[in-house]
Image (cartoon, rainbow, N blue to C red):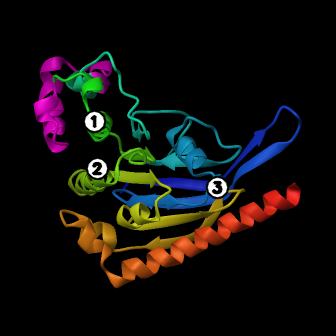
């Protein structure tokens, strides 16, 4: 089976004044095909930097990323990205946005239309396919972004706070959709979030990162994502083990934030 391998990834940003910021230090992960992984940590721990390196938007200072035994050297169709805001084309309607990737890959309209219709049905937007993007709610726009990503048939889907801007109810519905897509498509999904609850629900494997320089602090293997597929997520949250793990991680990140604040005050 194909896998995504992060081999001793470090990232250093050099500043104009001669200083530098060590954003990541020696991060290694072996992510199996079809795995659903959430990444959590205090602000500034390098979560998004790590995702951008996997996507190929940034080149690591040290180490390498490998997918299907090939070194990642830049963006490619095999790795799809879903951003906090959909980054959709406002001048295109819903159908045209989802069809954009296949059309750029030279797939004819007659071939791509059935796939686009299927994906719009999967994300619940079949009745909105001719709508302009500005006519959609935030949740609907993120559904379009998910469908557009899937239309390119990536091996890995990368999500950077994709639900962070949504209201609580819409966010919960979208969490259920992410679980549904994960189970139905078998895609590898890596999701960055600031929400402990979301990380617990959307991570059969959960990584907690330590403050800068970002590195893996603790890893969890959890049952809640599997239980949440097609289920009431509020019922999943009632599991005593869910509550216990939630409090453990909250305390862990709280202590990290306190450490960061202590460093800042000491420097001042």
Label 3: how many residues lie within 10 Å, few (<14), some (14-19) or many (20+)? many
Task: Using residue 190 as the reference point, say whether residue 177 is left or right of it.
Answer: left
Question: Do the residues bearing badges 1 and 2 touch, measured as CB atoms within 8 Å?
Answer: yes
- The mark closer to the camera, 3 or 1, is 1
Please identify the dominant SS of the magenta region: helix
Q: Which mark is residue 170?
A: 2
What range of the chain is rendered magenta?
A: 100-129
Question: Spatial distance from mark 3 to mark 1, Cα to Cα?
Answer: 31 Å
Task: Using residue 110 as the reference point, say whether residue 161 is left or right of it.
Answer: right
SS under mark 2: helix
Residue at x 26% of width, y 38% of height: 140
Residue 111, image quadrant: top left
Question: Spatial distance from mark 2 to mark 3, Cα to Cα?
Answer: 27 Å
Q: In which quarter of the image is the N terminus?
A: bottom left
Does residue 27 appear in this view?
yes
Label 2: how many residues lie within 10 Å, few (<14), some (14-19) or many (20+)? some
Q: Identify the mark nearer the N-term, 2 or 3.
A: 3
Is 104 part of what is drawn in magenta? yes
Residue 36, image quadrant: bottom left
């Amino acid at each position: 089976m194909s896998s995504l391998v992060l081999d001793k990834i470090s990232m250093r940003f050099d500043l104009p004044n001669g200083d530098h910021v060590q954003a990541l230090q020696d991060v290694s992960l072996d992510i199996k095909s079809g795995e659903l992984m959430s990444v959590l940590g205090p602000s500034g721990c390098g979560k998004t930097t790590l995702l951008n390196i996997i996507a190929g938007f940034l080149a690591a200072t040290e180490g390498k990323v490998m997918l299907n035994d090939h070194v990642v050297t830049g963006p490619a169709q095999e790795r799809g990205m879903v951003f906090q805001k959909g980054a959709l084309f406002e001048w295109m309607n819903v159908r045209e946005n989802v069809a954009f990737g296949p059309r750029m890959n030279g797939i004819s309209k007659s071939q791509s239309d059935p796939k686009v219709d299927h994906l719009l049905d999967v994300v619940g937007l079949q009745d909105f396919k001719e709508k302009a993007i500005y006519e959609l709610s935030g949740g609907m726009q993120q559904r379009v972004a998910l469908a557009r990503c899937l239309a390119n048939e990536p091996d890995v889907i990368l999500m950077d706070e994709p639900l962070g801007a949504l209201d609580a109810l819409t966010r919960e519905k979208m969490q259920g959709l992410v679980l549904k897509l994960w189970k139905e498509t078998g895609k590898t999904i890596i999701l960055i979030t600031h929400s402990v609850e979301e990380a617990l629900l959307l991570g059969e494997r959960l990584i907690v990162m330590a403050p800068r320089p970002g590195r893996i602090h603790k890893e969890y293997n959890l049952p809640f994502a599997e239980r949440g597929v097609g289920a009431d997520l509020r019922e999943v949250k009632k599991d005593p083990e869910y509550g216990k793990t939630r409090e453990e991680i909250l305390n862990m990140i709280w202590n990290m934030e306190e450490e960061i604040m202590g460093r800042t005050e000491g420097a001042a």
